[in-house]
Image: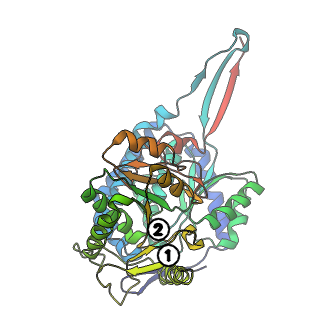
Amino acid sequence: MSYTSINPYTEETLKTFPDATATDIKVILNKGHEAFLKWRKTSFAERSKILHKAASLLKENLNDYTALMADEVGKLLHEGEWEITLCANICDYYADHAEEILKPQKIKKLTENEGDSVLYPTPQGIIWAIEPWNVPFFQVFRILAPQIAGGNVVLLKHAPCVPQCAEMIVKLMREAGLPEGVFQNIYSTNEQTEEILKDQRIRGVALTGSTKAGSIVAGIASKYIKKSTLELGGADAFIVLEDASLEKAVQTAVFARHFNAGQICISPKRMIIMDEIYDEFLTRYKAAVKSLKAGDPKDQTTTLGPLVSKAALEHLNQQVEEAKKQGVTVETIGAPVPKKGYFFQPILMTGLEGKEIRKEEFFGPVTHLYRVKTDQEAIDLANESEYGLSGSIQTGDEKRGIEIAKKIDSGSFSVNGALFTSPNAPFGGVKNSGYGRDLAHDGILEFMNMKLINIQK
């Protein structure tokens, strides 16, 4: 495995980093454990101070971080600003609420002779975060902030194409005052995964990535009796009812599907449109996609960036070719994209019903479009996916939207919105989209030992 930073717009290799050696792993794990023994004893006030400082540094150096993400993953500047702001909000949220979330909980007695029972949320040790490239700061901070707020320490294995982002986050946290060893980065290989996970000082693993990667890591974790949380792929439904505002629905659909060049796990990849408005939605959607401007991620006028890598571009092209072989109607939409850089021309797919390829996640600006006639047909189509991460519905009747949302098998769902993420809202999926929750109360409690202490009188 090569940790190499390549600019997806210029295709220029920026920097490479050597893989971790067996000695590196031992040193890092030793340092992490030693740091934990001290960090778990720190006060909430001390942890809060560091997290607030991290939030301040994120805001103060926002332009540096957005420029780095533009260079390393092709993220547009305004997308990077959204991401860094969200990371700062996550740090502030746990700085302000961790102590309240983790306060001891007295259990109500069933009988007097059972004594008093109290739950004490207790940190456990090193939590290993295996994270992807698409939102390289957010993916880290949604694990890092709650875990260090709770007294755990974190070891990061970031995606091989974002080594500079990983390095920058470690530097940021040290500047915020986080003691050495509480948060470390490791350039480990896939082959070293088991070696790291079997170490008794690793007490859990949080992975965001593909379903295949999640299955492998969760299997290794279970072998060594380690807790895991998985946030995996998604094929989110975007349902548009006949009573929706078409202007708003199209605007939301185009923005959400093409945000980050379509490389977002909760991006609406399957548009499910009511028959009465299907043709008008299609016309407006294609016109709106045509208005997107592909180009330099650092140009403020750019609205569609490149894919992250040559491999990502090749994989998406292979999926499109397979769809054609299976009889799917594939239509190129939007203005022509640049020849240089890992740009992908937006595509619209119809006639997907009954085709195997419809089950796959398309990680890029590819839209699947379906026509339905009833609410139940929309629900059934949304639920046929093996994934269950998120989704959304557009409607003029909020109550109707909520009732449909409740019937969709997913971790979350938006009514008249999309891409919803907030520090105080649990985030995660079901089915092949994984298990466990990040953010909010759930995110900090996932890797706490809920220790019960019973006192007999």
Which one is in front, 173 or 321? 321
Residue 179 visible in the current orientation: no
Which one is in front, 118 or 135? 135
Foreground disc of the pair 1, 2: 1
**Few, some or many residues within 10 Å of mark 2 (<14, 14–19, 20+):** some
Instruction: Give the residue type that dot 2 points to.
Output: Glu
Label 1 vs 2, first from the N-terminus: 1
**Few, some or many residues within 10 Å of mark 1 (<14, 14–19, 20+):** many
Which one is in front, 45 or 80? 80
Alpha carbon separation for disc pair 1 and 2:
12 Å
Residue at the bottom extreme of this rendering? 339
Q: Are marks 1 and 2 in contact (CB under 8 Å)?
A: no
Residue at horizontal 67%, vertical 28%?
Answer: 452
Residue at horizontal 44%, vertical 74%?
Answer: 349
Q: Residue 418: horizontal and vertical position, in percent?
A: 37, 55
Q: Which residue is mark 1?
A: 161
Q: Secondary structure beneath disc 2?
A: helix
Instruction: Give the residue type that dot 1 points to.
Output: Cys
Which mark is drawn over residue 167?
Answer: 2
Indicate left or right for 372 with 62 as reference. right
Residue 324 visible in the current orientation: yes
Q: Quadrant of residue 66?
A: bottom left
Say if 387 sits above or below 440 in the image: below
Name the quadrant of the C terminus.
top right
Q: Residue 289: horizontal and vertical position, in percent?
A: 30, 73
Q: Residue 142: horizontal and vertical position, in percent?
A: 47, 53
**Colour pattern:** rainbow
Say if 149 sits above or below 283 in the image: above
Which one is in front, 73 or 25? 73
Name the quadrant of the N terminus.
bottom right
Q: Residue 51: horizontal and vertical position, in percent?
A: 41, 47
Say if 52 sits above or below 162 in the image: above
